[in-house]
Amino acid sequence: MNEKEDTWDLKIKPHSKWYDLRLGEILRYKDLLLLFVRRDFVSVYKQTILGPIWFFIQPIITSLTFTVIFGNLAHISTDGLPSILFYMCGITLWSYFSDTLSKTSDTFTTNSGIFGKVYFPRMIVPLSVVVSNLIKLGIQFSLFLAIWLYFFVKTDKIHPNETIILIPFLILLIGFMGLSFGIIISSLTTKYRDLKFLVAFGIQLMMYASPIVYPLSIVPEKYKWIILSNPVTSIIETFKYAMLGVGEFNWFHLTYSLVFTIILFFIGLIIFHKVEKSFMDTV
Amino acid sequence: MSNVVLKAENISKQYRLGQLGTGTISHDLNRLIAKLRGKEDPYLKVGDANDRSKTGGSDYVWSLKDINFEVKQGEVLGIIGKNGAGKSTLLKILSQVTTPTTGEVKVRGRIAALLEVGTGFHPDLSGRENIFLNGAILGMTKTEIKNKLDEIIEFSGVAKYIDTPVKRYSSGMMVRLGFAVAAHLEPEILIVDEVLAVGDAEFQKKCMGKMKDVSGQGRTVLFVSHNMSAINNLCTRGILLESGMIKHIGNISDVVSKYLDLGVEGIISEVKYDINEQKKFQIIGAKLLDKNDNQILNAIDVKADFKIRINYLFKENFSSIHLTVFFTNDKGEIVYFIDRTDFADTYFSAETGEYSTTLLFNAPLLLPGRYSVTLGLGNTYTSDNDHKFDILFFEITNTSAFRTSRAGYIFKPVEWPMNKIS
């Protein structure tokens, strides 16, 4: 009897060990992940006239708005850079973070219909959001590059440097941070809906606590630690430093963001996995 | 022993009743405190059996309680029970949509559920794209789907519209496509719930055939349905659930007949009356019988003849007596009314004495459903009468057809001649 105990492929139990995350299953369902990405991408702009051009319009309009309000009206410094380039640099990376966070933060509530009918590793859904937003980032990044190239040729204010090789790492880091925040929030909202109201508000607040509409250099020394304790700050700063040659690059701050993301991600995974098994009863 | 592919051990599932959200934090805290002190979850001890008709004292209810069973490879297991018996909860646990509160299910091989066809269809995507999406959701890989794509499209019968967005599909087409994908899944254990309830008859036949194939290939099927003829046809063994507990498990025909017994709680097939000194004539008893004159205790199949035996008594001679029978359905409508005089020209006369009349009702006559019987005996000239309202109760069921019920009142077969004109 004992030898046969081990031949079961699957055991459905009320509780499992917190470290039993069944990550192997995600690999088995990788096709589903890609199909979800495709679905998100294709369906969003179906029956629109401009189609994928909307991907360009969003960052341009936002950058122009920021240029008018924060640059022309509020006269906030851009470290001597053309303001449109400065804002777009921050917005491109920030919107990847905020889109990922807000879209993964309602994973359970928006998918409860399908989750209630069929089992697949729930993590596939937020992961597919990370990937489809990555494609969107790619498109917006190429727009930013075009503008960046224009100013690079026309002016001598831009000084990209060797930290540019860190950019893939920065993108990965900020994507996972958005994902981690998102899955934690989505896990908690299955039971306590209050958090849902905080998400939109919280993202906005976090944006102003990140050096997007202002350079880190104008923050008074006294309050700098507040801005720096925001794990997004160093990622955005490093990105700006790499592409434009302004801002601060600090290994210590970047390591802080990395460690923060790793810890947050594991906490997220554990909570998410715990919730995915029983959320149908509480959602 | 080695070919047991699914084993459920003591699984139970508890749900909390009432408004969700109020007091959950305090309950969560109590649970946490109990856990930290190494004690058992305080809310697991409470809970009533799942009986919807009664109001329990507790906020918690056991939707399933101590379910134990085994399924062997290649077996088709039917799961039946009345609404609310816990069938869906059991399937949800088996398909991993939710976890049991206690107990464990062990599975050998891949398990896939076909709970509702078309799950995860995206309206903007074409039929073809949705085949891939739906297949992947159900656990197939892209290559598996690609290899079977033509077969799936052919099975669905919507080849013409395969590149049209599914939002333009009729609901029937959606169901066909959904089932086509699911039917080409190749899990070791397939869970099917009520999918046969939709689609046209031809397609249902196709589906039944497919399910038979699946089990023929040595794979295991768990089938939940209210359609007893489908259950009888497909399944080898069955489980009957009642109020979250296993009422009976075993051979499918036993289980189905136990289920039919269940459906007719409150059946009354015999009544007797004391002799009333005031009355000159009266009904003294009535009995429901099958065609072999055995008392009916179970539901009556729609195709089975049944009889009503009426015993009555005259204390003097009468010349103008009439005897009436009518059936009332559960909505209170009289669906069938017949009098002794209806197809005769005269009232009948009777001498003093005790009589028995047995009426034979040739099936099919009534739609499946619950009925009560009212009897009346009367003297046309004096208007004296003895009426017994709703004294017998019986149920007609249909276990041998795809459709177990229809609208209307009567259920008589007709010939369907088809003359080709051109």
Image (tube, grey):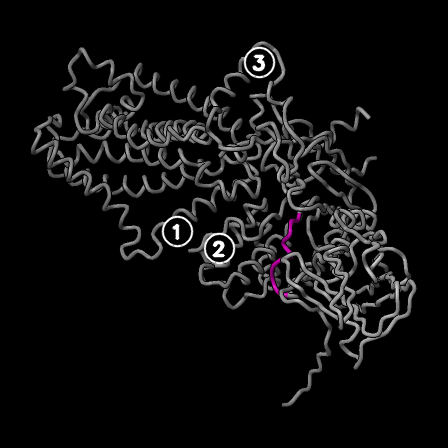
Label 2 sits on a secondary structure element that is helix
Residue B136 visible in this rendered orientation of the protein: yes
Mark 3 is surrounded, within 10 Å at the Cα level, by few (under 14), some (14 to 19) or many (20 or more) other residues, namely: some
- Residue type, label 3: Ala
Q: What is the number of the mark on residue B34?
A: 3
Mark toward the start of the polypeptide (3 vs 2): 3
Locate the C terminus of chain B by quadrant.
Answer: bottom right
Q: Position of residue A168 (x, y in %)?
A: 35, 31
The residue that label 1 is drawn on is A42
- Residue type, label 1: Val
Q: Is residue B396 above or below residue B189?
A: below
| In magenta segment, residue B349 | no
- Same chain for marks 3 and 1? no
Label 2 marks a residue whose chain is B
Depth check: give the residue in front, B25 or B345. B345
Which residue range is magenta in the image? B192-200
Residue B111 visible in this rendered orientation of the protein: no
Q: Position of residue A6 (x, y in %)?
A: 74, 27
Label 1 marks a residue whose chain is A
Mark 2 is surrounded, within 10 Å at the Cα level, by few (under 14), some (14 to 19) or many (20 or more) other residues, namely: many
Mark 2 and mark 1 residues within 8 Å of each other at the beta carbon: yes
Mark 1 is surrounded, within 10 Å at the Cα level, by few (under 14), some (14 to 19) or many (20 or more) other residues, namely: some
Observer-side mark, 3 or 1, equals 3
The residue that label 2 is drawn on is B129
